[in-house]
């Protein structure tokens, strides 16, 4: 049996006097494409923050098993694409500078970027379909261009895992299709964890599913049933495929307090 890249064992997480995640167990493997779904408030973002080291657990372990050789002290590399709404578009920074900032974790916050670093950023920008926009301020970008810039920042360090938190938020379907094509190409080189409320899109893109709703229920592929979704979301859900990107329809249901 192959060793996972990330191994989560009996994880319990809480804050503000309540436990949010109970006894979570999960393995993420090389070149996996894991979709994390679940109702609002179920703990999706909490789990991601724990994996990123931004939130301490009450108990349990998250163990990283690096595959790629790194200089001493750099350890396991994770790329992160945050939610669109967390970005300050008024900040005076260019596309190239945003992409280069993805190297800061490897070089240190005070290190200067070299000519080779800037050449790498240019190559990443080209890969993201951003050639010619390297010096443009991020405040002038479209939603799709900004997402591709942030994805470039996430991948420039050649991470072993890339985590994306609601990447399709505020994107129209045209730009969303471009983003998922980039992710398909990227998945040939690294594992991807995609967090989304859009169940239909997730099922179309990923290889495996984890539903987080206080606990974690893992499904090793995307051939899941409506019953599985209803059990984990605690309300009836129907899926409807339409065009290249499916969408979801929620059946009539009542939430009980």
Image (tube, rainbow, N blue to C red):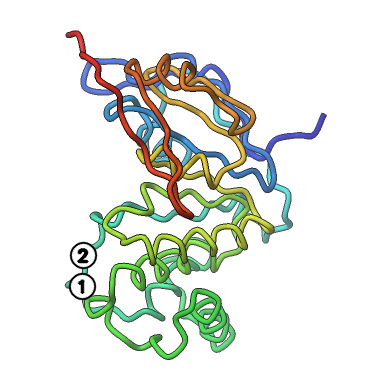
Residue 88: mark in rendering: 2
Q: Give residue 197's position: percent from left, percent from top.
A: 35, 38
Work out which quarter of the rendered image holds the N terminus and state it.
top right
How busy is the neighbourhood of tag 2: few (under 14 within 10 Å), some, or many (20 plus)? few
| Residue at x 36%, y 32% (from the top left corner) | 46
Counting from the top left corner in percent of width and height, residue 81 is at 41, 56
The residue drawn where x is 48% and y is 38% is 51
Residue 53's label in the rendered image is none
From this view, report whether residue 167 is shown above or below residue 221: below
Q: As displayed, is residue 39 above or below residue 184? A: above
Percent position of residue 21, x then y: 39, 20
Q: Is residue 187 above or below residue 7?
A: below
Q: Nearer the viewer, residue 44 or 73?
A: 44
Q: Quadrant of residue 90?
A: bottom left
Residue, x 58% and y 26% (percent of image)? 26
Residue under label 1: 91
CA gap between label 2 and label 1 equals 6 Å
Label 2 with label 1: CB-CB less than 8 Å? yes
Would you say 69 lies left or right of 228 here?
A: right
**Residue 67: image location, x then y, percent:** 73, 49
Q: Which class describes the residues within 10 Å of circle 1: few (<14), some (14-19), or many (20+)?
A: few
| Label 1 secondary element | loop
From the viewer's side, name the closer residue of 223 and 5.
223
């Amino acid at each position: 049996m192959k060793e996972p890249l990330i191994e989560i064992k009996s994880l319990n997480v809480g804050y503000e006097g309540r436990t949010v995640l109970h006894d979570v167990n999960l393995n993420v493997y090389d070149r996996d494409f894991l979709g994390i779904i679940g109702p609002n408030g179920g703990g999706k973002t909490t789990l991601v923050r724990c994996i990123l080291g931004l939130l301490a657990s009450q108990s349990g372990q998250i163990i990283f098993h690096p595959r790629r050789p790194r200089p001493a002290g750099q350890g396991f590399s994770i790329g992160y694409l945050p939610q669109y709404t967390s970005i300050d578009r008024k900040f005076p920074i260019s596309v190239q500078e945003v992409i280069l900032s993805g190297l800061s974790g490897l070089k240190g916050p005070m290190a200067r970027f070299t000519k080779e670093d800037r050449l790498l950023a240019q190559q990443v920008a080209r890969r993201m379909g951003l050639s010619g926009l390297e010096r443009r301020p991020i405040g002038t970008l479209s939603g799709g261009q900004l997402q591709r810039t942030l994805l470039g920042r996430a991948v420039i360090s050649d991470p072993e895992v890339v985590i994306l938190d609601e990447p399709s938020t505020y994107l129209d379907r045209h730009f969303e299709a471009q983003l998922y094509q980039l992710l398909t190409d990227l998945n040939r080189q690294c594992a991807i964890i995609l967090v989304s409320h859009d169940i239909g899109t997730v099922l179309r893109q990923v290889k495996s599913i984890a539903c987080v709703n206080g606990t974690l229920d893992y499904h090793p592929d995307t051939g899941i049933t409506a019953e599985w979704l209803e059990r984990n979301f605690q309300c009836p859900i129907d899926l409807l495929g339409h065009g290249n990107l499916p969408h979801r329809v929620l059946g009539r249901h009542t939430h009980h307090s």
